[in-house]
Every structure is written in C-alpha cells, then in structure tokens.
Image: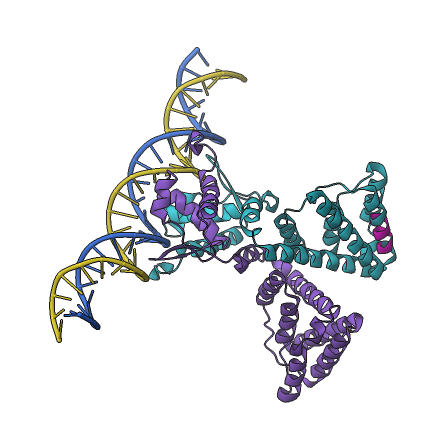
Chain colours: A cyan, B purple, C blue, D yellow
Amino acid sequence: MQNSKPTSKMFLDIVGELRSIIREEGIETGGKLPSERELAERLQAGRSTIREALRSLELLGLIETRRGEGTFLADFRKHQLVEVLAAFIMQHPDSVSDVQETRSIHEKAAIITVCQDTELRRLPVWDSLLAKIDVDGEILREDLVREMIVATGNRLSLKIWFLLKQYSKVPFEEMTKSDENEIVKRLLNYLSEGDVISTLAAYSEWIELVESERGERRK
Amino acid sequence: MQNSKPTSKMFLDIVGELRSIIREEGIETGGKLPSERELAERLQAGRSTIREALRSLELLGLIETRRGEGTFLADFRKHQLVEVLAAFIMQHPDSVSDVQETRSIHEKAAIITVCQDTELRRLPVWDSLLAKIDVDGEILREDLVREMIVATGNRLSLKIWFLLKQYSKVPFEEMTKSDENEIVKRLLNYLSEGDVISTLAAYSEWIELVESERGERRK
DNA sequence: TGATGAAAAGTGGTCTGACCACTCCTGTCT
DNA sequence: AGACAGGAGTGGTCAGACCACTTTTCATCA
C-alpha cells in the first residue's frame, strides 16, 4: 500500500503500523508482539526495516526484546531512554531548566487540584504518608508527589511527570532530612485543610531547600 | 574491545560509541557524522547494526539523516521524542479528558508565570492582542494562549502544549464571539495588573463559555 | 577559455539470505 | 514417570546486492 512512495522514511511508517497492530490486537503491557519475520511479511517490508523500527522503540523503552523468546510491550518504568537522553540532551543547559520547570508545573497543578477537592484532600493516603514520616523518620519526595498526581486521576499528567522525572536525572532518591520532614508535615496539614496558597508555599519552600542542599553538595 | 561479549545488545554499545565519536571529533549541532559504511568499518560491526543504532537516535530526534547526503547531528530542542511518546500514550481512549486537563495545566501555569513577572506582564504583545480585538473584532484563543507560553520561555512546555492542542480533536479554530471579547479584555487587564487570581478566574470563565457553546452545537 | 552536462563517486534506504545463540516445546528413550 | 536430545521458533548479526538521491569530477563543446 505505502510501497508507492519509496521516498521518505519507511521505518517511521513501520513505527506507526506497529502502533496500529498494538491497538487493534489489544496488546497489553507485557504482552507479546508478532515476531520480526511475521511483521516483515504482514507489513510487506524487509526484516531489517522492521528491526530498525523495533530497535528505535526499544531504545525509547517502549518495547523489550528477549533473544529466543520474542518482543514484548514494555512497562514505562524500564526506561532505557533515560541514560541515553541524559547523556545526549543534558549537554544543553536550556533543556535542563525547562525540564525542571515543566515538572514543577505538573506537580503544582496536582497540589492545586487535590487541595480544591474535598474528596481528594481527605484521602487516607495522606495520613499514611504522615504516619510513614513518624515511623521511618523519612519520606521519599518522589512518593509524595506521585501520590498527589495519582490522586488527580490524570494519567497523562502522571506519565509526562514520570518522564520528566527521569529526564532530570534528579536524585529524587535521596531521603528527606529532619528539616524537610517538618516542611512536609506542614504541607500535608495545609493540604487537608484545603489551603491552596499555604500548601503551594510549603511546596516551594521544600523545593528550594532540596535544591540548595544539592548545590552545597556539588562543591 | 566489546566483542568479547557477543551476548546482550550490541546496538546499544554502538549508541555509546557514537557518543564518543561525536564528542572526540567535536561534532557540533548540524555537523556531519561519518558515513554508515565508514562507521561499520571503524566500529567493527555490520552496516545493519550501525543502522539500528542510527535509526534509534533518529527517532529520538538526536540525529537527522538526508538521503544522498549523510547523517547530521540534530538540534536537541526538536524533542521528537515527545511526539513519539505522545502517539503511544494517546492510544488510550480514556485519556481524552486527560488531554484537555493537561493542556489546561500548562496554560494556567503560563498565566501564573506571566502574571507574577513584572517584565513579562508588560510585554507589548498583550497590547497588540487587545488592539487586535478592537480592530478585527475577534481573537483566536489559540494565539493568546500561545503567546503566554512563549513569553514564559519554557520551550518544552510550549512543545507539550502544542502537541496536546493537536490531540484534542476539536481544533480551536473558532473565532471569539462578542461575549468572549469582553472576557478576554478583562483577562488581559488583570494580567497587566499582575492579579493572578482574577486572571485565572477570567481564564476559567472563558473556557467554560467556549465549552458550553461547543456542547450546544453538538446537539 | 569557460560553461555545460554527463558520468562517477559517495551516501542513505531497503531487501534477501544466511548464520549464530538462545528459549521453549516435544517426543523419545531409559 | 523422569530425563534428555532434538527441532522449531525467535532475536542478533553480518555480508552483499540493488535502488534513489546528492555531490563531485571531468571531459566535451561552444
């Protein structure tokens, strides 16, 4: 069908065709895709071309291939993508700040949404997180923010956030210090009261604290 | 060197090797990479393997290839990655409302940023838009919002917004009605005063008006 | 001499066929 | 019934062959 135009990238068409196949056959995360040889036949293309498309998606972390077994629809969290992009893209200082900024946009939006919804801000998960601070003496910043976005129910925002988080190879993995715990507790309290302004202020305070600490450590 | 382990993905090694080559040879944005055949020889790999690595980087938007000419280092800011991911993400039908909401997140964030920056909120572009309403009697919602995001200087956010706009099936090509003009004028006035709350309120009012009109027309 | 244009060289795009290494299933043999 | 060997299926890689396109070269012609 598309053979009429041998010009322009065919492997990009293949990527699109793969999308269709995944959708039409209802392949779920972790599900198996047709073999390379079968795809080549179905899409009327050489196996090399199919492979170029598959390898692209693999580098993006969208699919996963296992020799001897097959090709599978991957889970986002695998992200081979991060390492490569981090290496390539992070050379551009502009992009780095954009990524940070954009991630923050999604985080703040989640806070606002949760704060303004009486249902959401009374979710038991917030109490759980508070309890976790007291018990473990610490809390992952990533966990708190993720739960916020999850609570909003906006899956797209969640995925974008997840991506951005990986982009900014930010050491989200650090534990919170005692100073931070105090801020987080305040943030969660404001949240339960639906005080948008104060919650956002606490959030900003938190971010600044973490950033400044990171700056110190760099020296 | 890496030939010692024929197991595990070699094309990933190639991606790394390419990075080294780019760095060592000081290839700048827009510069030309060695040809596929030369790379194959230098890296002791088949041309297909080299191509798999190159195609991956191309899908990521990191390189650009032109038939008959060669392979070139692309401008990272193109963020082709976002498009590909978006295409995959969007196949979930239940994400339609997510798209609308996420787009709104970016629009509101831009409004807030512009409002809180005395430099940005006094940009001549806002007066131009106000004048445009008086002259043409109308203004494209798309234009206003775009200018807002452009003003923030966050290219990534702009890119994401642009994508989301395309994916929300209903294009916003409609012109504003007289009712809307009044709201837009108020919005721009609040903006110039740096009144975040009121500006956001006007924005919400505007959105609701447009949505309700669209709802009417559907019937 | 200078301009023109055809041939050659270089490059990405694609296909085919052939191996290899690995995994999984199957059926036979003990 | 269990263990094991073999085959089938799959991804990983390579080599070679065309094709389409661009750039360069260089011989030809005015």
Location of residue A140 in the rendering, given as x and y in whole percent from the top left corner: 75, 43
**Pick the front one: B187 or A177:** A177
Residue B88 picture quarter: bottom right
Residue B41 in view here: yes
Compared to B139, does A209 lie above or below?
above
Res. A119 visible in picture: no
Start and end of the magenta stretch? A184-191
**Residue at the spot 51% in from the left edge and 54% down from the top edge:** A24
Quadrant of the rendered structure where residue B148 is?
A: bottom right
Q: Residue at x 57, y 42 (%)?
A: A30
Q: How far across and down, in percent of the image, does residue B97 sit?
A: 66, 63
Left or right of A5? Residue B197 is right
Secondary structure mostly seen in magenta is helix
Name the residue located 45 percent from the left edge and 30 percent from the top edge.
B5
Where's residue B205, x and y in %?
A: 75, 75
Q: Is residue B105 magenta?
A: no
* Number of marks present in the image shown: 0
Q: Give B25 or A75, whichever is nearer the viewer.
A: B25
